[in-house]
Image (cartoon, rainbow, N blue to C red):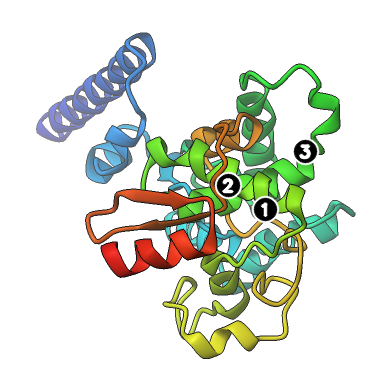
Amino acid sequence: MAKKKQIGMKWKYTLGLLGISFGSLLGMMFYYHLDLSLLASLSFYENLANPSIRIVRVQEGLRKEQIAEVFGDKLGWSEREKEEFINAHLALNSQNLEGRYFPKTYMVLKDEDPMGVTSNMLHEFIKETSTIKKPKPSEILNQDTVIKIASIIQREAGGKSDMKLISGIIWNRLFKGMKLQIDATLQYAKGSEEDGWWTKVDPEDKSIDSYYNTYKYNGLPPSAISNPGLAALDAAYNPQKTNCLYYLHDKKGRIHCSTTYEGHKANIKKYL
């Protein structure tokens, strides 16, 4: 009996040390502004030290169905709960929330429900976007428009260094009344769980009859096509000044732009 009591005391002592260590680690990460995603791979340690908490990393550029899968896998959601997350806008009597699920590493309760996660992500979106330095006549920039553009930038850019240039080109095309002709919007139109959410665009896809098909329809798509990070949102608000109307990435991921379609064709021949 004494031996069992001794073992129990040792186990409580060990759990206590783990809890203290976990708390100290979190404190250090916040103090030194370290990324919580560092903890995302430490699931064994996480579960031992804090069994009620789950660390969930949401990458930039996912669509809401993918985010539902990420949280669903971590929190053990049923298919019904995933659908509840995807259709949260219906419960909130609001517009499509695509683009407003802010991507970052979250710490959530292991039994958090879909509406709780939705509320948390929307709150983070509001908090993070409030830090963006917006142009002074920002009242002329409709937030829905900015979010749509940011969501395209997130999917189209080869990295953060490309984002403001791509933003400038998208804005230029919109101001000129040109079709955007962007593959990422077609990927959103044809994406599915069965075939993949971001499959390669084939030439015949350009005839798909969808308002997300920016080869067929003018202007922006009906909603955002992904959930952009802070850099893409900042780029949408603060585009690079450019005369370019076309762009492509070469095989090494470097961006090349041109002011004319003839120049774009020359770039295709040269870099692809």
Element type at mark 1: helix
| Residue 165 percent across, percent down from the top left | 50, 40
Q: Along the horizontal axis of the image, is 11 left or right of 128?
A: left
Q: CA distance from mark 2 to mark 1?
A: 6 Å
Say the numbered circle drawn on residue 207. none
Quadrant the N terminus occupies: top left
Say the numbered circle drawn on residue 169. 2
Q: Earlier in the sequence, mark 3 or mark 2?
A: 3
Q: CA distance from mark 3 to mark 1?
A: 18 Å
**Which residue is drawn at the image coordinates 77% and 38% (left, top)?**
143
Q: Amino acid at mark 3?
A: Gln
| Residue 112 seen in the current view | no
Front residue of 106 and 35: 35
Up/down of 145 relative to 125, above or below: below
- The 10 Å Cα crowd at callout 1, few under 14, some 14 to 19, many 20 or more, is some
Up/down of 189 relative to 144, above or below: below
| Residue 23 percent across, percent down from the top left | 34, 18
Mark 2 touches mark 1? (CB < 8 Å) = yes
Mark 3 touches mark 2? (CB < 8 Å) = no
**Which residue is drawn at the image coordinates 29% and 23% (left, top)?**
22
Residue lying farthest to the left in this orientation: 3
| Residue 161 seen in the current view | yes
Q: Amino acid at mark 1?
A: Arg
Quarter-wise, where is residue 128 in the image?
Answer: top right
Query: Which dot, 3 or 2, sits closer to the camera?
Result: 2
Residue topped by disc 1: 173
Front residue of 35 and 206: 206
Q: Along the horizontal axis of the image, is 168 left or right of 178?
A: left
Element type at mark 2: helix
Residue topped by disc 3: 143
Query: Which dot, 3 or 1, sits closer to the camera?
Result: 1
Q: Amino acid at mark 2?
A: Ile
